[in-house]
Amino acid sequence: MRKFSMLAFMLAIMSLSSCQVIGDIFKAGVYVGIIIVILVVAIIIWIIRKISG
């Protein structure tokens, strides 16, 4: 019984830390996505100005 409770405790710790890692990766992905969208919009505006100028 003691081995089972120790195993359950270790699994709980590992799952909590992995969820935190996944959350951090998702947050980084959101920021990278925002930066990419801003860059694409800036390039489109630059191209439109080049064509119309």
Image (spheres, grey):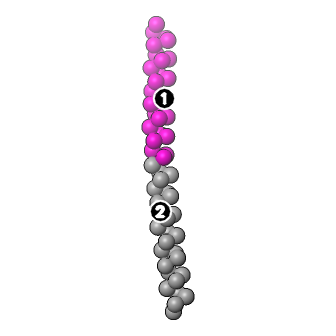
* Magenta residue check for 40: yes
- Mark 2 and mark 1: Cα distance apart in space: 30 Å
Determine the residue located farthest toward the top in the rendered image: 53
Q: Earlier in the sequence, mark 2 or mark 1?
A: 2
Disc 1 residue crowd, few under 14, some 14–19, many 20+, Cα 10 Å: few
Q: Which region shows up in magenta?
A: 28-53
> Which residue is nearer to you in this view: 44 or 6?
6
Q: Determine the residue positioned at 48% across, 29% down.
A: 39
- Disc 1, SS: helix
Q: Residue 40 placed where, x, y %?
A: 49, 28
Q: Nearer the viewer, mark 2 or mark 1?
A: 2
Q: Residue at x 45, y 27 (%)?
A: 41
Residue 24 at x, y = what percent?
A: 47, 53
The location of residue 34, given as percent across then percent down, is: 44, 37
Q: Amino acid at mark 2?
A: Cys
Q: Which residue is mark 2?
A: 19
**Magenta span dominant secondary structure:** helix
Residue behind mark 1: 39
Residue 53: % across, % down: 46, 7
Q: Residue at x 48, y 18 (%)?
A: 46
Q: Reply above or below: 4 against 10.
A: below
Residue 49 vertical placement versus 39 (above, below): above
Q: In this rendering, is residue 18 above or below 33?
A: below
- Label 2 crowding class (10 Å Cα cut-off): few <14, some 14-19, many 20+? few
Observer-nearest of 1 and 51:
1
